[in-house]
Image (cartoon, rainbow, N blue to C red):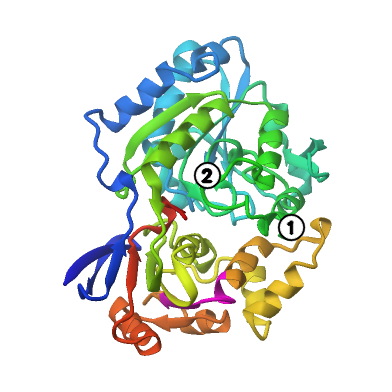
Amino acid sequence: MAKIKIPYNKKMLEVDIPDKNLAAVLQSGSESYTTKLTQEEIVEQALDNPIGSKSLEELVKGKNNMVIITSDHTRPVPSKITLPILLRRIRKVNPEIDIKILIATGFHRPTTREEMIDKFGENIVNNEQIINHLSQNKDDLALIGTLPSGGELWINKLAVEAELVISEGFIEPHFFAGFSGGRKSILPGIAAAGTIMWNHNSEFINSNNARTGKLLKNPIHEDMLFAAQKAGLAFIMNVVIDKDKKIIHAVSGDSKLAHEEGCKFVSNLSSIKSVKGDIVISSNGGYPLDQNIYQSVKGMTAAEACCKDGSVIIMVSACNDGHGGESFYKNMAEAKSPQEVLDKVLKVSKNETKPDQWEFQILARILSKNKVIMVTDMCDTKIIKDMHMDHASTIEEALNKAYKLKGNDAKVVVIPDGVSVVVTD
């Protein structure tokens, strides 16, 4: 009997899988990766050795103002560590520079003050200029160009008007952009809603190159790269974190070159061979990524890569914040079946992309071939069932349901943290 721990909210759940059923436990190398450096030392070392760029200090000299783009409440970037280091190094060479911290909310809701304190620490929240990006507030936006795919590139005016734009973030596998981090600070991070929706259109989402771990010929990534260059993203500091959200690696420098180096590190650490299962258990890595169903689709895609047609996915995710997007919920709930959602969405042109369309498109793709059981005791069951999924309060309950569907000899694949892996064929 194998005992396996799975992240859930801010704790770990334990599941027992009989040896006869367990096909594989698939984990990122970050689970066992060790370093003798402290988190602070890793960040400092990366900033001391920028990739393809002048140092942060050189870029800051002589500037009157700058914008630091940072991630929102849905991303586990350890900003309590990274931001103080960035601010100290900036002010050491330019004490008078005006610094605005712009939260890259993308199409998400604004980050609350309580969430800011949790993420940045009370000292930064009380003493720095922190602004939520609002993607639908036209007065905050400026048109700076046209994307390679033809869409208009609108971004936050604060970044356009700043003498220097830098960003911090983290790099992990991403279910349609290939990897997070780098250029994503601009698009979708501080882009207009219309620009985000154009970039996340159904044609691009349907591309076989718009998948976890893929950057080459990924149409979504290509637009994002252009946006970062056009916006003048001069410098990035991106970290890689482990299952405990601790920093194990960092890169800094040019927004493209440094990001690519960070992606190589993550790819080498996180790539795992697919093992097909009748039942696949996954999670979203716990808090903060498992706050809603919207974000939980990411962890489902890792499970999807290990499914046979007709497999059962058991998705362990708190979803304490509900569905995570009204359009996401309604488009799933109002359809008779996931296939109906897919049929409709693939007919939608780029300039008519609906809010959250990319998320319900991917969820519908998964549900059109597999059954999903959401494991949570923190989310309204009706929401889950409305969206064509089943519900269980515990992993044991979900497994019992899955065994009834797939048989007592069903093979089980467990991916303890679905957002931390790149599943390859």
Label 2, secondary structure: give it: strand
Name the residue nearer the viewer: 336 or 76.
336
Residue in the image at 31% along x and 86% along y: 400
Give the distance between the C-alpha atoms of the residues marked 1 and 2, in whole angstroms. 19 Å
Dot 1 corresponds to which residue?
A: 203
Q: Quadrant of the N terminus?
A: bottom left
Q: Residue 322 carries which label?
A: none
* Left or right of 53 in this view: 242: left
Residue 56 x, y percent position in the rendering: 51, 18
Provide the residue span drawn in magenta: 366-374
Where is residue 217, by image quadrant? top right
Residue occupying the point 80% across, 68% down: 347
Q: Is disc 1 in contact with disc 2, using a CB cutoff of under 8 Å? A: no
Which residue ends up furthest to the left in the rendered image? 1
**Residue 37 visible somewhere in the drawing:** yes
The amino acid sitting under disc 1 is Glu
* Closer-to-camera residue (407/161): 407
Q: In this view, does 399 lie above or below 214?
A: below
- Give the image location of residue 98, x and y in percent: 58, 23
Estimate the x, y position of residue 117 in percent, counting from the top left.
Answer: 42, 46
Residue at which label 2 appears: 179
Q: Residue 79: tell me if it is visible.
A: no
Residue 165 point in image, percent of width and height = 62, 27
